[in-house]
Image (cartoon, grey):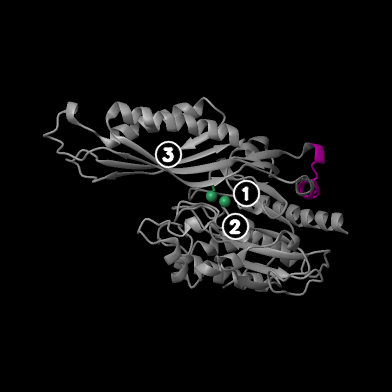
Amino acid sequence: MTTIGTTIGTAEWVMARCDDLTRHSARPDALERVYLSPEHAQANTAVRAWMLDAGLDTETDAAGNIWGRRAADGTPQRPGTPGEPALVLGSHLDTVPDAGRYDGMLGVMLAIAVAHRLRDVPLPFALEVVGFSDEEGTRFGKALLGSCAASGQWDPGWWEQTDAEGVTLREAFARFGLAPERVSDAARRPEDLVGYLEAHIEQGPVLESADLPLGYVTTIAGARRFVLTVTGEARHAGGTPFSRRRDALVAAAHLVTRIEELARATDCLATVGDLRVEPGAVNVIPGRAELTLDLRGRTDTGRDALWEQIAAAGHDIARERGVTFEVAETHRAPSTACAGRMRAAVVTGIEKATRVPSGAVLGLWSPAGHDGMAMDAVTDVGMLFVRCRDGISHHPDEHVDPEDVAVALDAFTAAVLALAEEAR
Ligand code: GLV
Ligand code: MN
Ligand code: MN
């Protein structure tokens, strides 16, 4: 990969590499890079080269995550080498459709830049960098597949999940050159880990409103995702009076507005992000509607209580309209608290980089999901949030200021050194 014009380990380098990665996209006009796609392989190849430049040895694991590692003394070392626990820095390399260039990628590039900055600094632990392969769940509906594999939480029930073309996860593994039966090789053991630290754009407006470049994460929201299917009867749009209709789309539309109404009465978030109608013809009453539902809550109990209300509403609407209502849960992740020692390290990092006194460093909860939700099963998790313009994310207009990236790089480096200090 070309790294001309920028010096590795600088904020300019981080920005330029996030730009470079936009080339690896399924679409010429937009950024879309999903799990186990040719673009995923290309991005891993590019990232591997940058990890090598930063003085790390590299390896792609059994679930397609790309890892780099140096030993405590700074020499490159094979990722996952047992005997010397590692602090892991990273984020994800997959995207939503028509994505921005920083969600996930910024955290991986910052992690590589930190590794480069510290390449000659002995640490009391090994340092690893990871580019997780699937955080978004864009292709198979189930999010956090990469970090679930790395944290030993792979569920064999996922193998038959399909993408929009009907390709199963098992088939996609084989096409990518991975062996499904070896996925458990990707699992990391708690005794081999010191912690997991991730930098990420905030994806919301809080830091911008507070006029601050950085914040630390307190808790990551609990999430659940569903596919809801409404089945009625496809019939002639002209020959079928209203009294005889069982219109799946009208029932689904009522449900969508009811979902928003129910969620607005809580402190949770609910989003119907996709709606497919069959047979999808102008003169045929819709016989089937399939909608996705994404639920998030600061607490799992709040989120689950909202789901109970939505499920009851779905059954009520189905009864009133003579259609059926079915539910398939595709993803569930518990709300995750960042560990006290990891929060403290991030706060120290922010304090050092911005000169804000630690009492004034802003803590935020994250309604967006992150790989730390999975990694929490095997190690302590901490997160650094970076201000993004207008809080916009999951959109090509995603933007971070290079000045903020420069402070983030200083803070992320200082956070690693604070953990080193604590471990000595
Ligand atoms: C990941 O970006 C999510 O959907 O929260
Ligand atoms: Mn995202
Ligand atoms: Mn992300």
Report which residue position mark 1 lands on. 373
Q: Amino acid at mark 2?
A: Ser
Image coordinates for residue 164, horizontal then vertical, percent: 37, 55
**Label whose residue precedes the other's in the sequence (1 or 2):** 2
Indicate which disc residue 36 carries: none
Name the residue at 57% across, 68% down. 62
Q: Which segment is the magenta one?
A: 345-359
Between residue 35 and residue 63, name the one nearer to us: 63
Q: Are marks 1 and 2 in contact (CB under 8 Å)?
A: yes
Label 1 C-beta lies within 8 Å of the nearest ligand 1 atom: no
Image coordinates for residue 205, horizontal then vertical, percent: 59, 38
- Classify mark 2: helix, strand or loop: helix
Indicate which disc residue 147 carries: 2
Examine the residues drawn in magenta and state their main secondary structure: helix
Report which residue position mark 3 lands on. 272
Q: Residue furthest left?
A: 239
